[in-house]
Image (tube, helix red, strand yellow):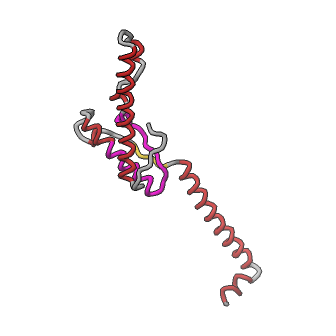
Amino acid sequence: LDNMIISPEKKSLSTAQALMQSMENAQKLLKGWREVTKELYPDDEDILALIPLPEAATLTKARDAYITTDTCSQAKNVRTQMIKAIKDLAVKEGICENTEDFRMHELDCWNHLRNLWIEHAVDFLEKRVLLKSLWNQNKAGAWREHLVE
């Protein structure tokens, strides 16, 4: 695959298409590698067997796979578009009859979710400590005076 896949439009659909194009490029590279190797070593099938077949470079290997992205809406859109493109490819390649037969699982990044959870937990605890502090001040009458003002 390409080492950096960024679509010019920076949209989820074009990013998914760029990923698919990257796989097509990998297939072309494998095909060319096999052709050159066959020319250089015409009598050596063992060396040719070491090079993957071009059709082996496909995103349809992601059947029953877990697709994990960040939790932001842009990342989720890319994930949705990728899954749709992979399922459509699976139907096109004859792996399944319809997209519902090709199962993939969507997950949010646990590290990001954990960080969001910790941030919200800290905010909650700060508010709780503040309320507890105000409650304790009530015993000295500060809370009552604050309410009157």
Residue 65 included in the magenta stretch of the image:
yes
Q: Quadrant of the C terminus?
A: bottom right
User: Could you tell me residue 17's position as x and y percent?
Assistant: 35, 46
* Relative depth, front residue between 103 and 143: 103
In the displayed image of the protein, which residue is found farthest to the left? 97
Question: Closer to the camera, 89 or 5?
Answer: 5
The relative height of residue 148 versus residue 88 in the rendered view (above or below) is: below
x and y, in percent, of residue 38 in the image: 36, 17
Q: Residue at x 44, y 57 (%)?
A: 73
Residue 11 point in image, percent of width and height: 39, 55
- Looking at the image, the residue that sits furthest to the top is 43
Seen in the picture, residue 46 relative to 140 is either above or below; the reply is above
Left or right: 45 as drawn, with respect to 101? right
Quadrant of the image containing the N terminus: top left
Q: Report the front residue among 136 and 58.
A: 58
Q: Which residue is drawn at the image coordinates 42% and 55% (left, top)?
A: 10
Range drawn in magenta: 58-85
Q: Residue at x 43, y 40 (%)?
A: 66
- Quarter of the view holding residue 89: top left
